[in-house]
């Protein structure tokens, strides 16, 4: 693998590892809003969280060659299952279902990605 690409991927995973705790904090905030403390900007905030989740997934997908080179296992199928489950909950438009799926699906998926990113970025 080209060293420049590898360096870029490592940097991306380091950035990802730093970003994930912030994303989880945002997820916790939006879950509370969806469970009854809804604010005028809750829908906009939820969209920003979803954009963040998609960014995280994009980074992981862009770094798969590095993960494979380092023999770092990433259960892409499990992450996809979590993503599909959240998409289904989001599609219902039910705030409680969305918040529950964030607990059951999104947080575990993000933690799985965090573990992978930490392992790749920090050896």
Image (spheres, rainbow, N blue to C red):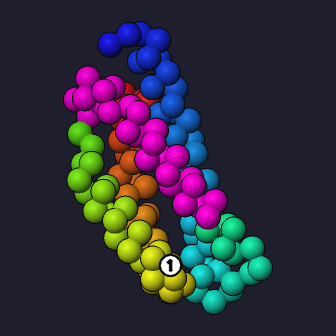
Can residue 17 be seen from the camera position used here? no
Return the x and y of residue 110 as percentages of the image width and height. 43, 55
Question: In which image quadrant can residue 26 be found?
Answer: bottom right
Is-magenta flag for residue 62?
Answer: yes
**Is 62 left or right of 31, judged from the image as shown?**
left
So how many labels did they put on this image?
1
| x and y percentages locating residue 46 in the rendered image | 61, 68
Front-most of 79 and 13? 79
Quadrant of the rendering where the N terminus is positioned:
top left
Label 1: state its secondary structure.
Answer: helix
Q: Is residue 84 left or right of residue 35?
A: left
Residue sitting at x 45%, y 83%: 92
Residue drawn at 38 percent across, 10 percent down: 2
Locate residue 6 relative to residue 34 in the image: left or right: left
Q: Measured along the vertical axis of the image, is residue 37 above or below residue 76?
A: below
79 over 104 or under it: above or below: above
Picture quadrant where residue 40 is located: bottom right
**Residue 90's x, y, as percent?**
47, 75
Q: Let me know if residue 28 appears in the view.
A: yes
- Quadrant where the image shows the C terminus: top left
Residue furthest out toward the top: 3
Give the residue displayed 45% in from the left and 42% down from the top. Answer: 58
Q: Which residues are magenta?
A: 47-72
Q: Is residue 56 above or below residue 84?
A: above
Prevailing SS of the magenta stretch: helix
Q: Nearer the viewer, residue 120 or 67?
A: 67
Q: Residue at x 41, y 33 (%)?
A: 62
Image check: 50 left or right of 38? left
Residue 119 drawn in magenta = no
The location of residue 10, given as percent across then percent down, is 46, 25
Circle 1 Cα neighbour tier, 10 Å, few/some/many (<14 / 14–19 / ≥20): many
Name the residue that disc number 1 marks: 99
């Amino acid at each position: 693998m080209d060293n420049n690409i590898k360096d870029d991927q490592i940097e991306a995973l380091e950035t990802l590892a730093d970003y994930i705790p912030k994303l989880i904090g945002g997820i916790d905030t939006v879950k509370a809003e969806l469970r009854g403390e809804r604010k005028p900007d809750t829908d906009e905030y939820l969209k920003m969280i979803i954009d963040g989740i998609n960014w995280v997934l994009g980074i992981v997908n862009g770094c798969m060659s590095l993960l494979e080179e380092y023999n770092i296992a990433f259960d892409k199928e499990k992450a996809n299952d979590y993503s599909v489950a959240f998409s289904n909950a989001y599609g219902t438009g039910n705030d409680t279902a969305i918040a529950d799926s964030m607990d059951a699906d999104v947080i575990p998926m993000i933690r799985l990605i965090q573990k992978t990113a930490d392992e790749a970025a920090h050896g």
